Amino acid sequence: MTATDKYTVIADRSVRLLGEADQDNIQEYADRQHVFIIGSKGIPAQYGGFETFVEKLTQYRKSERILYHVARMAEDDRRFVYNGAICFDIKVPYIGPARAVLCDMIALRRCIDYCKLYPEVKEPVFYVLACRIGPVIAQFRKEIHDLGGKLFVNPDGHEWKRAKWSRPVRKYWKTSEGLMVRSADLLICDSINIEKYIRKTYRRYAPVTRFIAYGSETVPSPLADTDPVFTDWLLEHGLKTKEYYLVVGRFVPENNFETMIREFMSSDSKRDFAIITTTDGKFYNRLQEKLHFEDDRRIKFVGTVYEPSLLSKIRENAYANFHGHEVGGTNPSLLEALGSTDLNLLLSVGFNREVAGETALYWTKEKGNLSALIHAADAMEEAEIREYGDRAKKRVKQQYSWDKIVDEYEALFLGVGG
C-alpha cells in the first residue's frame, strides 16, 4: 500500500484504510471488549436512524476498552478505521428488499468467522439492528454461544405495519421479529412502548429487555440567520423566517402526510407548509388526485436537505414543526425537532407522547382536529412558544443526549466481559 493509498475520503471525512498487516495485528486488541454491529448501512453515517446511531455511538466513545466492528453495505470490500471503529464493507447485489437481509446474513457470518479465526477475542457481543434475519438466527446464535459470545438485538419499531411492504413481506417481518425475540440474549429497545410491546406480545419466550433511548443533539446550527446557504434556500422556495410550518420525514402513508396536508389546507393559516421529503411518484399522485394540494400555494414540497447544519437552521426558523409518525419507536427526526424547533405539533400516539411529554401539542387523525390546533398555534404568543421550546430542549438534554446514551451502552457492553 502506497502513502497515497493509505487515506481516502468518504462523506467528506478522512478514514484510514487497513492493510493486511493492520488486519492481522489482533494482539493489539486482545484485551478489548469486541462489539460487532450488524444491520445499519454503516458509517460514515448515511441518512437514517440506525446509521446516525452507529455514527454517534463510535464518535462519542469514551472507553478505550471497547472496540467496535461495523458492517457497511457498499460497492466494494474495503476495511478501514473510522471513529476508532474497524469498518468492513459488504458487497451485496441489488436484489430488491431482500438485499438488506442478505447483507445482515453475510455480515454476521464474517463477524463470527473473524472470532473463530482469532481466539484472542473473548466474550464478543453481536449487536443486530432490526429483525430481518429471524429464520436463520437460531444457527447463528448457537455459533455465537459456542464462542462464549452474546446476541443482542434492537427490535426497532413495528416494521411489519409499514404500508410500503406487500402483505407477504409484512408477514415475513412479523414472523422474523418473533424468531429474533426468541433467540436474543438481550433485546435493547429505544422506546418504552416498544419494550412493553415485546414483553406482552412475546411473553411465552420470557424475553430479557433493556430500554436505552435514541440520542440527539441540542447544539444550535453553526449557520447564522443571514448565511447565504440558508437565505438562498428560503428564497428558492419562497419562504420567510418564522412564517412556515415544517415537516421532515419519509414520504410514506404511515407518516400521515395525507392528514397533515388535508388539515393544513382546511385551516385559515396565512403561513406556508414546507415539506422536506423524498417524493414517491405514485403516492404523490394519489394524494394530489385526492386533495388537489397543488392548487394551494401554501403547500410547498421543497425536496430533501441532507446537510445537517442547513437542516438544523431550517428547523430553528420554522414557526412550528409537524410530526405524524405512528409506526416505530423513538424517532430521530422527532428528537431533532424537539432540540431545534420551539413549537411542535405531534400525532397523539404513545411513541410521540413518551418522547415529548408536556413539551409539545398533540393532534389526532379525526377530521378538523389538526386544523383547529393550527388555528390555536397561529394565535399563540411568542413568549408561550419560547417556553415550549425551552422545555423541549431541556428534556432532550436530560433524557436523550448522546453522552447519556453512550454511557449506558458502554456500561452494558463492558458488563458482558465482567
Image (cartoon, grey):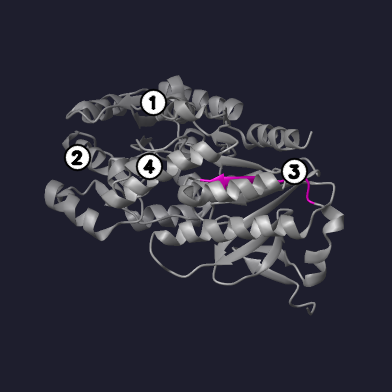
Q: Earlier in the sequence, mark 2 or mark 3?
A: 3
Label drawn at residue 262: 2
Picture coordinates of residue 32, whole percent (x, y): 80, 46
Q: Which residues are magenta?
A: 121-129
Q: Earlier in the sequence, mark 3 or mark 4?
A: 3
Q: Which is nearer the eye, 212 or 153?
A: 153
Residue drawn at x 60%, y 25% is 398
Question: Of all residues shown, which one is farthest toward the bottom?
Answer: 2
Left or right: residue 354 compared with residue 283 = right
Measure the C-alpha gap from mark 3 to mark 4.
30 Å
Asked whether residue 16 is in view, the answer is: yes
Report helix, strand or loop for mark 4.
helix
Q: Where does label 3 land, which residue?
A: 123
Q: Where does label 4 land, which residue?
A: 174
Question: Of all residues shown, which one is farthest toward the right?
Answer: 27
Q: Are dots 3 and 4 in contact, CB under 8 Å?
A: no
Of tags 2 and 4, the one toward the viewer is 4
Q: Amino acid at mark 3?
A: Glu
Picture coordinates of residue 396, whole percent (x, y): 55, 29
Q: Amino acid at mark 2?
A: Arg
Q: Are dots 1 and 2 in contact, CB under 8 Å?
A: no
Q: Residues within 10 Å of mark 3 (few under 14, many from 20)?
A: many
Left or right: residue 47 compared with residue 234 = right
Q: Where does label 1 land, which residue?
A: 350
